[in-house]
Amino acid sequence: MKRHIAIVFILAALLAGCSGDTDDIGIVARVNGAPIYLSQLEFQHDQFQEDSVGAYVPSVAKLRKEYGEILSDLIVQELVVQELARRDLSVTDEELRKAENTVRADYPEGAFEQVLVEEYIDLKSWRRQLRYYLAQKKFFQQVLRPQIKIDYKEAEKYYRDHISDFYLPESMRILVVRGPSRELVVKAVEKYQKDHDQMNLATAFGEVETREVVVREGRLSAPWRNALTGLKAGQASDVLTDRFGFEALVLLERSEAKVLPPAQAYPLVEEALLEKKMENAFEQWLSGTLAKADIKVSEHLLESASKAGDGDGSGPDAVFTEPDTPSADEDMQSLPPDAPQDMSEDDMNGQEQSDEAIPMDQVGTDTGI
C-alpha cells in the first residue's frame, strides 16, 4: 500500500504510546469496547488522497486533523454496525457473496482481480469494505425507512412550496448523424427519413454513427441553434462541418416549456421528502446513541495532543483517553450528521490488524434510500 513518510511517522508515534499493553497495539479507538484499527484509518486516508499521492508531503499536524475526521466517520459506522447486530440484522455471508458477484459481473473475466493488483488492494480488504457498505444500506432500508411516513397533505404542500423545481423548460429530442463525408451523411439521413429505423443506418452505412440526445433549447450551441431554427418534427438540418467530420441533425420532437402536474411530480416530491426525513431520523438516532456510547479515542488524534506536541508527533504516552467533556459525543466534534459513506465492522471474520485497501469506486456511495 502506498504511504507518505509522514504517515509512517504517525504510525510510530501511535505505537510508541501503547504503555506496554499489547492488546492496544494498532488500535486508535474503541467504540463500546469494539476496536478501530490504525489500518482502517490508513486505508480511508489512502483512498481520499489517491489523486495527490507524491504531489506533496503533508505536515504531521495536517495528517492528525485528517485522521481525526476519518476516525469520526469510522466511529459512526461502527455504531451503525452494532445497532444492526442488536436487531439481529447483521449482513450475512450470503448477502456479501451476492453483492460481490454483482460487482464482478461488470468486469471481463480476470479483470476484477487485475484491478486489485494494479491498485495494491487485498481482496479480503475489499470484501470487508463491501460488507460495511451493505450494513449501511441495510440500516437505512430496514431500520430507518419503516419509521418514516409521508401523507398526501405533506406532499401537496411541498409541491406548492417548490413549484419551480418541477418546471421543465423547452427542449428538443434530436438524432445526430455523423460520417466521414457529406455525401454519406446525406444518404444516411434520407434513409432514416424513409424507414425511421436508426439501427439500420449502421448496417447500411458502416462508417456512419448515430446518437439520440435531448437538449434544452437554452443550452444549444450556436451552430446547432442555427441549424434547427424553423425545423419541424421529422425534418433534418443541412450537413454541418467541423474538425471531427460531418454531421446532420434530425429533429425528432420539440417539447414546450411546462410545469409537471402533481401526479407526475409526486415521485420526485416523495423522494425529496423521504431524503429529508431520513436525514432527520439518522441525526436523532445518532444523537441518542452517542449519548449512551462508551467511546475512547487515542490522544494522538485529539486536538490537545496536536497542541502539546506542536505538530511534531510527540504527546502523551497513553494511547486511549476518556473525554474530559461530560459526554463522549461532545468530544467527537467532526461526527457527520448524515449517513456514512463506508461502513466499519468489528466482526469481520477475525480480520483485525490487516493492512488493506479497496478501490472505493467498486463499493459505491449510494445509501440505498
Image: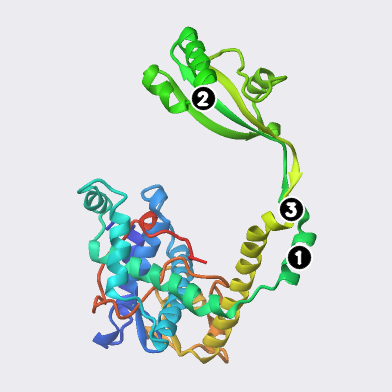
Say if 252 sits above or below 308 in the image.
above
Q: Position of residue 266 (x, y in %)?
A: 67, 60
Q: Which residue is mark 3?
A: 261
| Residue that extends furthest to the front in the rendered view of this protein | 195
User: On the picture, is 91 further left or further right than 117?
Assistant: right
User: On the picture, is 243 further left or further right than 19?
Assistant: right
Q: Position of residue 314 (x, y in %)?
A: 40, 74
Q: Quadrant of residue 99?
A: bottom left
The earlier-in-sequence mark between 2 and 1 is: 1
Say if 173 sits above or below 189 in the image.
below
Q: Amino acid at mark 2?
A: His
Foreground pick, 64 / 143? 143
Foreground pick, 309 / 112? 112
Q: Amino acid at mark 1?
A: Glu
Please identify, in this view, whether the residue under mark 2 or under mark 1 is nearer the observer. 2
Whether residue 345 is visible here, answered yes or no, is yes
Q: Tell me the residue at 45%/81% (across/down).
A: 79
Q: Which residue is mark 1?
A: 156
Q: Which residue is mark 2?
A: 196
The earlier-in-sequence mark between 3 and 1 is: 1
Whether residue 243 is visible here, answered yes or no, is no
Q: Tell me the residue at 39%/54% (across/down).
A: 361
User: How many angstroms separate mark 3 from mark 2 (CA)?
Assistant: 31 Å
Mark 3 closeness class: few <14, some 14–19, many ≥20 residues within 10 Å? few
Q: Secondary structure at mark 2?
A: loop
State the quadrant of the N terminus.
bottom left
Q: Position of residue 300 (x, y in %)?
A: 42, 76
Q: Secondary structure at mark 3?
A: loop
Q: Tell me the residue at 24%/75% (across/down).
A: 351
Disc ID at residue 344: none
Q: Quadrant of residue 331?
A: bottom right
